[in-house]
Amino acid sequence: MAASKAFVEFLHDQLRSVGPIAVRRMFGGAGVYADGVMFALIADDTLYFKADEATRAEFAAEGLEAFTYATKNGRNSLTSFWRAPERLFDDADEMQAWARTAIGVARRAARAGGKRARKKAAS
């Protein structure tokens, strides 16, 4: 699971108008962050956007799949990240639109996670 320097630079260029993004290496790949939330991940120079119940159908309708990785017992799927459509790499405006949607998903998840943590602490 690698994220090449050239691919990361290409994404920075494609997502310039989305706002400042940070790419942090992790587990051989990389997480892509905006405003402190991870909205995408890169594995083997493949981009996966954050998805939720409201957006997964868009990915599925395009025939895309959730991120999977190998484990000692086979493969595991991470349904919160789905492969970005290949056509986005030729259309910066559409890439940015999908990225903004993924950032919204990541923000909602972060808020929900904070609410769960506060609720658990109160009990």
Image (cartoon, rainbow, N blue to C red):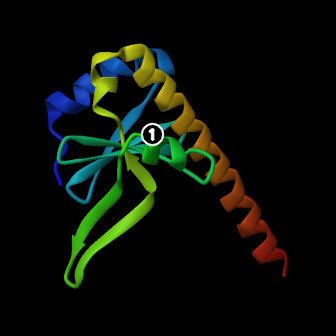
| Residue position for label 1 | 33
**Horizontal placement of 87 versus 101: left or right?**
left
Q: Give the vertical position of 68 relative to 91 (above or below).
A: below
- In the image, farthest residue toward the bottom: 73
Residue at horizontal 67 percent and vertical 47 percent from the top: 108
Asked if residue 65 can be seen in this view, the reply is yes
**Horizontal placement of 60 versus 108: left or right?**
left
Residue at horizontal 32 percent and vertical 72 percent from the top: 76
Disc 1 residue type (three-letter): Tyr
Q: Quadrant of residue 10?
A: top left
The secondary structure type at the circle numbered 1 is: strand
Q: Quadrant of residue 107?
A: top right
Measuring from the top left, give residue 92's x and y in whole percent.
37, 16
Residue at horizontal 19 percent and vertical 41 percent from the top: 45
- Density class for disc 1 (Cα within 10 Å; few <14, some 14-19, many ≥20) is some
Residue at horizontal 53 percent and vertical 42 percent from the top: 36
The quarter in which the C terminus is drawn is bottom right
Q: Quadrant of residue 68?
A: bottom left
Q: Nearer the viewer, residue 52 or 41?
A: 52
Measuring from the top left, give residue 113's x and y in whole percent.
66, 61
